[in-house]
Image (cartoon, grey):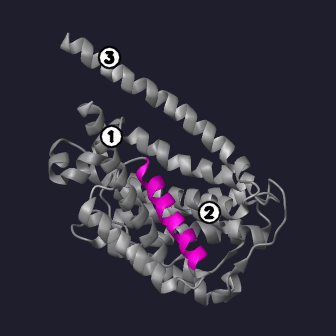
Amino acid sequence: MNVMTEVKKQRNFAYPSARGYGAAALLLTLLPFLLQNQLYYLDTLILALLWASAAGAWNLAGGYGGLLSLGHAAFFGIGAYTSSLLFVKLNVSPWLGMVAGAVLAGLMGWFIGMITLRMKGPFFGLATIAISEVLMITAVNWTELTQGSQGVNIPYKPGFVNMAFDSKIPYYFIALAICLVPYLLARWLKESKFGYELMAVRDNEAAAQALGIHTVRVKVVIIAVSSSITAMAGAFYAQYVTVIEPYHEFSFSVSIQMVLMAMIGGLGTASGPIFGSLVVTGLDTFLRDVFQGAQGGIQAMMYGSLLVLVVLFVPEGLIPWFTRRFRSGKGEK
């Protein structure tokens, strides 16, 4: 009797979950059309999805792999500059530029991983910061190619091939598609052999080695994948805002923004970076409304305060906290 009761509970929990996914898919499809006359909020939603994809990519390495990268802006900037320069200089479609940037960033991530992940300590995190700073300096000083600190202005040539549209709705669906990549990969990691190996390495690398797991290979693969997806987000960002400059694309603040979103939502969860991005991007929109663009220091203070509150009171992140509360509430009933 107890077994049958438990099976029924699991069924009743599964069916709403399936219906919930269907409802979420319908809402995500209709949402841009509902907001098409409210461009400010649609723009905020597109940016939230964009940063959710970057935070989700960071979460694959940082949350599931335990690899604390503090210089993921390096890969974001590689994607942005690769696609933009190929388009501006050689008239290569940004779609192909996005692929090229992803490959280049993946190779960079693989290279950094092969050098640093065999060593103990914080070498990987320090290496990513160093690479990001070196790329920033290079972009600032190589003015013949990058136009230095003036940045690169991307010409507006409407058309699917040029990833440029008169409406924001196509941008929304592109951002959503990119955001789904790390989300689906994170879901896959929870069920796959590679995912089990990765989380075993994260939790206890010595024990994982004793079990025969090639720990360096596992970590290098996940950082290369994470780097590639981050570059895709960077390439889309460049096409969406139509101007990029090194002090932003390679900045430490961009790296921290990815970490912050993943931590707020929940490290090692598929939906955590998405929720964290909605919170942070929504907060940014609110601050812009209240302070009319003059929120610089206040914005940083509120971001820092939010992170401190999460670390102190909800260290596992908001998604795991809400999930635990929901399940305990169901149990009480």
Judged from the image, the secondary structure of the residue bearing numbered disc 2 is helix
Q: Where is residue 158 in the image (x, y as percent from the top left)?
A: 84, 61
Classify residue 232 by image quadrant: bottom right
254 w.r.t. 196: above or below? below
Instruction: Say which residue appears at 53% left-offset and 47% top-offset.
Output: 181
Quadrant occupied by the N terminus: top left
Judged from the image, the secondary structure of the residue bearing numbered disc 1 is helix
Q: Residue 326 carries which label?
A: 1
Q: Is residue 239 left or right of residue 120?
A: right
Classify residue 255 by image quadrant: bottom left
Residue that label 2 marks: 44
**Residue stretch in magenta:** 271-290
State the residue in front, 209 or 250. Answer: 250
Residue furthest to the front in view is: 333
Residue that label 3 marks: 8
In three-dimensional space, the C-alpha distance between marks 1 and 3, rounded to whole angstroms, equals 18 Å
- First in residue order: circle 2 vs circle 1: 2
Query: Which tag is nearer the camera, tag 1 or tag 3?
Result: 1
Judged from the image, the secondary structure of the residue bearing numbered disc 3 is helix
Can residue 227 be spotted in the picture? no
96 w.r.t. 284: above or below? above
Residue type at mark 1 is Phe
